[in-house]
Image (tube, helix red, strand yellow):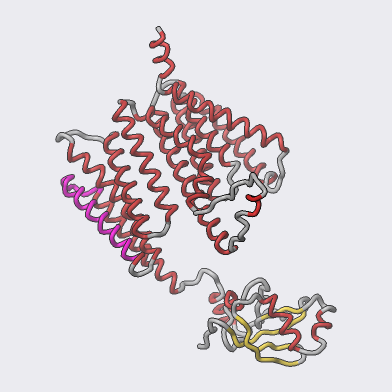
Amino acid sequence: MANMTSETCRVTVVAPTGWIEVAVPSDVPVADLLPVLVQQAGDHAAEEGLEHSGWVLQRLGEEPLDEDRTPAALGLLDGDTLYLRPRDAGLPALEFDDVVDGVSAGVRSRPARWRESTTRWMFLGLVAVTLATALAVLLSAPIPAAERAAAAALIEITLLAAAAGMSRAFADTAAGVLLGAAALPDAALAGALAVRLAEPAGSGGLGAPHLAAASASVAGAAFLAMLGTGAAGPLFLAAGGLGVAGTAGGILEIATRLDAPRSAAVVATVALTLAPVVPVTAFRLARMRLPILPRTPEELQQDLEPVASSTLLDRAAVADHYMIALSAAIGTVAAACMTLLPRQDGWEAAAMLPAICAALMLRSRVMSGAWTRLAVILPACFGLALYVVRWVGDRPAAAGAVLPLLVALTGLFLVGAERMPGKRLLPYWGRAADLAESAVSIALPLLMLAVLHGYGWARAFGD
């Protein structure tokens, strides 16, 4: 089969007055090629185009070619035939006289067809399933902890080495990232089991030491995977951030003898305090910097060199990926902490949980990316649902009142789905959200101190 060359593509253009064979550049948009083709199609073709809104190029039985795309992007091959048609009189769709042929053509044109790349992704998926099965065997097999820890550590090291080899030696980034990510749960298991080996025989359950060791192992493995693969930096950075947060929570609980809910309150407060610096951090991680504001006339002449659009757009995409990863890490940490807060009795934890949700919701309004916003909205929704379920669980008689309220809230959300898209809110709503976020930011540390019984300690110290 003829293939398109890397520089030109030889096609036949059928015009209303004849046909021409031309070699067109493969990397020039169709919109820039059309004037030349129209000029070669006839002496009066350009003037005739004014009578019917111009010309379009079209394959037989297909829609006109997208003028913003290049022949390479459109998949044009040497020997293809294109039809130069008036814009308002394109070729009609093909009519099939053979039903089987029509069905076959329709199936072949479907986007979700099995391709060579699909086969590759299938085998990578089988790799993931196999590694997940191995992890499940390590978790459930009735074998001594020492053997399980050694096996988990060996699998982790093997996967990290294989990830580096696939990415560096074979230039297969996808496989390398998959293997590097698969090493993280094995690292967590190896770390937790290592602590179990140091404990006295018969001690059961998982606690802060296991959390700290597992999280530290995940952070270390994520760092090695990021260095080894040289790719998916946002993914491994987010995993490393989760590991650091878990390590900090475990060490805090060990060092201060706080219980899990109180440690979770501290970790959640610190994580949400770091949320405003996520955009700046993502910007810097993408290796971008803003020019310094000039202070003198001489400084106005500095940093005037233009930046290539491709470079800047690529870095902007990297910054967006870091934004998503860091926001997801903060949202995940907040969700994990919210699952622990209800274990503590008292109004303090009950008040802090919705405050965390409010902080996440209010922070999401300044995020323009869909995935970035979802990364903080979904944990907030999870926390609110958890709060309602636990609140009703402690007050069974309130279920009769809560259910109608949830039904009414469902209707309110349906109305919002119909009316809110595209609607511009008045400026004072944005100002109110700013004030609310400031109030929640102030309230969170105060509620954290209440959860820690800090005010009681202060009163006792004063007495």
**Left or right: residue 251 compared with residue 378:** left
Give how far across and how far down residue 79 sits, in percent.
59, 89
Magenta highlight on residue 143: yes
Indicate the position of residue 242 as horizontal and vertical percent values.
Answer: 39, 43
Coordinates of residue 459 in the picture (x, y in percent): 42, 11
Residue at point 51%, 41% (across, down): 277
Above-or-below relation of 361 to 261: below
Q: In which quarter of the image is residue 122?
A: bottom left
**What residue do we see at 66% from left, 91% from top?**
21
How many marks the image carries: the answer is: 0
Q: Residue furthest front?
A: 298
Q: Is residue 8 visible?
A: yes
Q: Nearer the viewer, residue 305 or 38?
A: 305
Whether the magenta-drawn stretch holds residue 54 is answered as no
User: Residue shown at 61%/54% (left/top)?
Assistant: 302
Q: In which quarter of the image is the C terminus?
A: top left
- The image shows residue 438 at horizontal and vertical percentages of 58, 30
Q: Between residues 367 and 297, which one lies in front from this camera angle?
A: 297
Span highlighted in magenta in the image? 139-166
Q: Is the magenta stretch mostly helix, strand or loop?
A: helix
Residue depicted at x 44% and y 42%: 332
Q: Work out whether 209 lies above or below 67.
A: above
**Residue 396 seen:** no
Farthest residue, direction top: 463
Q: Is residue 155 above or below residue 26?
A: above
